[in-house]
Amino acid sequence: MPPICLYLHTHQPRRLKKFSVFDIGGGDDYFDRDKNREILEKVARKSYLPANRMFLDLIRRSRGKFKLSLSITGVLLEQMEAEFPEVLQSFRDLVDTGCCELVSETYHHSLASVYSPAEFRRQVDLQNQALKKHFDFSPRFFRNTELVYNNSIAKMVEQMGFVGMLVEGWDEILQWKSPNFLYTAKGGNLRLLARNYKLSDDIGFRFSDRGWKEWPLTAEKYTGWINLLNLDQECQTLNLFMDYETFGEHQWEETGIFNFFEAFFWKAMENPRNRFVLPSRLVAEVGPAGELDFWRLVSWADMERDLSAWNGNKMQQAALEKLYALENDVKETQDDKLLEDWRKLQTSDHFYYMCTKWFSDGDVHKYFNPYESPYESFIAFMNVYSDLKIKVEEKLKSKTKVAS
């Protein structure tokens, strides 16, 4: 069995109020605090708290042999600090064991890496500051929003000082190469860990699917599949990347997901050579097996593994274009509230809710979606944008008057 690198992504957005055209020009708070608190409380009760208890118990009972890495977006850290400090403390307890490595990303879970390199760097810096504040942790690894990645993004991330990055192990890019090895980014030294999407999605998406030919998934069966990876050649790593909400929310406790994962870990540990490993430790132990050329943008979303879930239709494209076109004016106001609202509007979920890909991926796009349709989402977003734009213009006019 190759070393297992387990990574879990943790995020909840600040969902917008159903902002109407009549609110434009007189809006105050754009975000639905009650709805966001209600959803976070549900996810915390069903997923974060029981999963953190399970992981902490595995670390203690295994005397540190269980290890995991995770990212927590800045917008979620804000909500936990304000509304559920006990949940934030449960994550701190994990990190304090030394068996949990925090991975950086954009504070606002945005697509800034594609639309504004300068804003991208700033949001990563804000995220690193938040991780230092809440966990006294300085991350060495990076994961971009929704694993969005290409060669250009790799260069930016390496310039920011990260040693490695998590990416999607998509067949179109890897071709004959296996995701179960360490790689470098094209033309650089940034180390890449590629997600084994098949084995990750067996847990993240297919675990409770009674129509799946492999259901039910047992610890013995899953461990057997992993052991088969080393038949042809000794693999360097098995990268299992999934949402944190896999445990208890995407896969409810009633499906047996917690029992399965505990049983899988102990089954794997029956062989003393098997181990879980942190990303930074892995890159310190093994050399890269080659280079990966991500010549196009790749994400971990949907069947296409591209950005079409966020910018695939004209509504999404218009919303993104107008929002990022406001960047210079927002920053020129030097108004912290306007800047923070603008950044929160960048959260990729807002554009995901506008997605019209309602075929095989439809249920995914409905997850915790507060809108009845993507068109309703677009209208609410553009109304908020229009209100923000008015405020920005008024602020700049008042600054000009004062200056004159």
Image: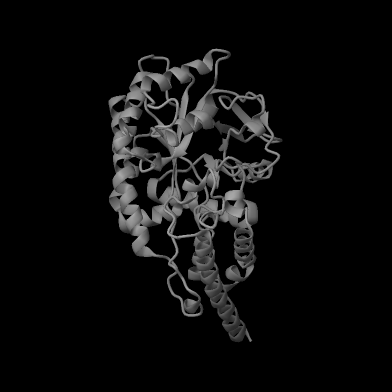
On-image quarter of the C terminus: bottom right
The x, y position of residue 188, in whole percent, is 68, 36
Residue at coordinates 35% horizontally, 27% vertically from top-left? Answer: 64
Q: Residue placed at 54% from the left, 28% from the top? A: 283
Residue 240 appears at what percent x and percent y?
A: 48, 31
392 to 183, vertically: above or below: below
Q: Is residue 117 visible?
A: no
At 51% from the left edge and 76% from the top edge, which residue is drawn?
21
- Residue 163 falls left or right of residue 175: left
Q: Residue at x 62, y 25 (%)?
A: 288
Direction from residue 396 to residue 4 in the image, left or right = left
| Apparent side of residue 25 relative to residue 86 in the rendered image (left or right) | right
Asked whether, in this view, residue 376 is left or right of residue 86, the answer is right
Is residue 342 placed above or below 235 in the rendered structure?
A: below
| Most foreground residue, 193 or 279 | 193
- Coordinates of residue 108 in the picture (x, y in percent): 50, 55
Looking at the image, what colour scheme do you see?
one colour
Q: Quadrant of residue 396?
A: bottom right
Of the pair 262 and 334, the residue shown nearer to us: 262
Examine the rendering and report whether any part of residue 140 can be seen: yes
Image coordinates of residue 105 in percent, x first then y, are 52, 47
**Residue toward you, 343 or 316:** 316
Q: Is residue 303 above or below residue 37?
A: above
